[in-house]
Image: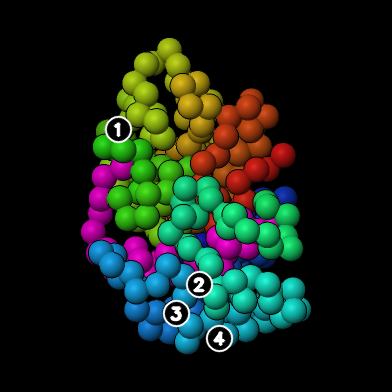
């Protein structure tokens, strides 16, 4: 994290709670990424963590997030049985069988637990792909929810799962590739000069756009959390976010 969390909280105290959660997320990611997960792009050996990593991953998760280990036991057992497929999460899919969690809580939990897996997948890819052809991450096929734009209107989309970045066109919807100008809207917010919303009526989706220069002082994850009020504004207008933010939230209302 390039920008000091305490400084962000001082400037935007309403972000204190999500940023404190994000500190735990980054601690968990750092702890798990010390393992050699063995994730590859072309042919992953496992659709989730290999059996040898399941116990230590869940131990670190429960410790860092201060959760009773028993509360994670059903998910851990499902993973041990090979019933969890992380690669389906970018499509918005959660396990079809019953787990004792509300669906939205399960989606958030799976996103947070799987984040080190996806980041390892993104690193294994070792390439910048292009979101422009299909509106999906070139590594894990997640839909983008954040993009940057430079002074020449060149855009980069960012994947909230694996961290991949790739070109996307400014004149089309980054999600459905709609190019009808009448069905796309830019929503600016007073006091947020570095951020704006790109909304599309064709797919009822939105992507937040951050000025590229602003990213010189923060990561895309932090930019996503700093612009959380824009999610609220877009969702009040009935536009949907298509991938989680760095703490696993999709719906803000």
Give the vertical position of 3 relative to 180 (above or below). Answer: below
Question: CA separation, marks 2 and 1?
Answer: 39 Å
Q: For residue 233, which quarter of the picture?
A: top right
Residue 195 on image: x %, y %:
50, 38
**Residue picked out by circle 1:** 169
Q: Element type at marker 1?
A: loop
Residue drawn at x 64%, y 25% as measured from the top left: 237
Query: Closest to the observer: 181 or 12?
Result: 181
Q: Earlier in the sequence, mark 3 or mark 2?
A: 3
Which image quarter is the C terminus in?
top right
Q: Does the CB distance between marks 2 and 4 fall below 8 Å?
A: no
Q: Is residue 213 visible?
A: no
Residue 145 on image: x %, y %:
48, 43
Q: Element type at marker 3?
A: loop
Question: CA separation, marks 2 and 4?
Answer: 17 Å
Give the crowd class for mark 2: few <14, some 14-19, many >=20 residues within 10 Å.
some
Give the vertical position of 249 relative to 64 (above or below). Answer: above
**Residue picked out by circle 2:** 82
């Amino acid at each position: 994290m390039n920008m000091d969390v305490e400084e962000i909280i001082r400037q935007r105290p309403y972000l204190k709670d999500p940023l404190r959660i994000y500190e735990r997320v980054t601690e968990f990611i750092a702890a798990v990424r010390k393992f050699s997960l063995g994730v590859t792009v072309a042919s992953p050996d496992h659709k989730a963590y290999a059996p040898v990593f399941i116990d230590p991953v869940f131990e670190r998760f429960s410790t860092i997030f201060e959760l009773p280990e028993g509360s994670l036991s059903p998910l851990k057992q499902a993973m041990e049985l090979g019933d969890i497929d992380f690669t389906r999460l970018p499509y918005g899919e959660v396990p079809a069988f019953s787990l004792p969690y509300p669906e939205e809580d399960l989606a958030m939990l799976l996103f947070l637990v799987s984040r080190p897996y996806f980041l390892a997948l993104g690193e294994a890819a070792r390439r910048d792909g292009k979101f422009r052809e299909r509106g999906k991450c070139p590594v894990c096929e997640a839909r983008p929810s954040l993009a940057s734009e430079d002074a020449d209107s060149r855009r980069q989309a960012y994947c909230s799962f694996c961290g991949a970045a790739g070109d996307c066109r400014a004149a089309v919807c980054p999600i459905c590739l709609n190019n009808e100008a009448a069905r796309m809207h830019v929503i600016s917010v007073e006091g947020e000069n570095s951020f704006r919303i790109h909304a599309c009526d064709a797919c009822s989706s939105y992507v937040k756009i951050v000025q590229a220069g602003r990213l010189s002082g923060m990561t895309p994850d932090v930019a996503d959390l700093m612009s959380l009020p824009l999610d609220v504004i877009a969702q009040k207008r009935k536009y949907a976010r298509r991938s989680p933010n760095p703490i696993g939230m999709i719906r803000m209302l």
